[in-house]
Amino acid sequence: MSVSRDWPSSALDAAATAFAALTCEPAPLALDCAAFGTATGLPARVMPLPELRDWLLRRPQAYTARDEVWRELIRRARLDGPQWVVAAVGMALPALRRYAARLGEGYDGDPADVDAEILTGFLTALRDRLDLTRPAPYAGVCKAAWRAGRDLRLRQRAYLAVEDIEHVALGARSPSVPYGHPDLLVRRAVTLGILDARDERAYIDVRLGRRAIEPIAAAIGVSPDALRMRLSRIDDRLADALADGLLTGVASPQTVARLRRRATHSAQRRAGRATTAARHTADTSAPVPA
């Protein structure tokens, strides 16, 4: 299969060109559908992505198969390189093109802008926003794409034409001043020893930045489920600290000393668990004497 060298101006057309390049012979990008199990109804073999996409399109009610395929696609897009990001976009292109056609009706601007917003919304959910523990991951990323394109259309309607912007009383249209800095509360929690400094960045990225948990867990060497449990415990500690006024008021020296003793004890306990795990790994990987 040959792919045109002329790069399209539309974001979705460009994604289609890149997807075609990744999935052409002699080595098309593929998924081993046997790994998903027989309950999905998927053929128990390796399927090139275009063939897998067609299989899913012909079976709109194959919800279990779609969920399993898309969890794997999203996981790979987050952990296995940009080719899988392109793969995920290509697999969703039929839906993304439908959204672009519907949202482009009556649009006064460049239709390529609608395409770009739809793709941006999709990629944001794919890389960071979507929680893979929730059901229907494909519906989640597609909904994010639709909302991004819809928001572009709504912004177009929100414009108000005036003769002299300098003399317009904006009133309720004036932007509100940002209020609250939760990242500073997290920093104070670290300072007081309520939160371990090694967990600060992961907590901010996942809870405040709404980033995907899988790449962050991989970067710090724990499983996504272990990180979810760790962050849940931090949620409880921060909620208690807020209720006690520790993060918004002035903590007494006695309270600060108590929290730091607790933090030191927790750090020593974590270090001990890490040492034990490392020894266990070393013992299990050592060669068996002949």
Image (cartoon, rainbow, N blue to C red):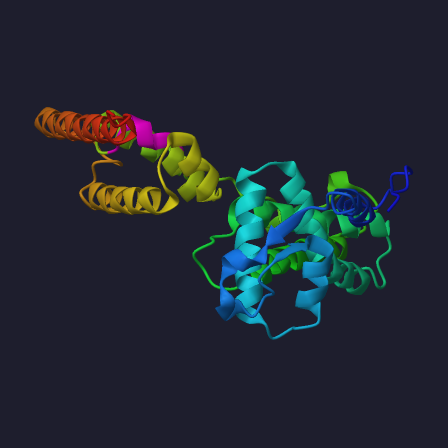
Left or right: 267 with respect to 211? left
Closer to us: 206 or 180: 206
Q: Is residue 63 above or below residue 77?
A: below
Q: Is residue 243 visible?
A: yes
Closer to us: 249 or 29: 29
Q: Position of residue 288 (x, y in %)?
A: 25, 28
Magenta stretch, main secondary structure, is helix
| Residue at 32% in and 32% down | 199
Which picture quadrant has residue 164? top right
Q: Would residue 196 be counted in the magenta stretch? A: yes
Q: Position of residue 175 (x, y in %)?
A: 59, 44
| Residue at 58% in and 64% down | 66
Left or right: 107 with respect to 232? right
Which picture quadrant has residue 240? top left
Closer to us: 11 or 252: 11
Left or right: 261 with respect to 209? left
Q: Range of the magenta residues?
A: 195-201
Q: Would residue 175 be counted in the magenta stretch? A: no
Q: Is residue 268 above or below residue 73?
A: above
Q: Position of residue 36 (x, y in %)?
A: 51, 60
* Quadrant where the image shows the C terminus: top left
| Residue at 45% in and 60% down | 134
Considering every residue shown, the one lying at the far bottom of the view is 61
Q: Is residue 280 above or below residue 146?
A: above
Q: Position of residue 91 (x, y in %)?
A: 69, 55
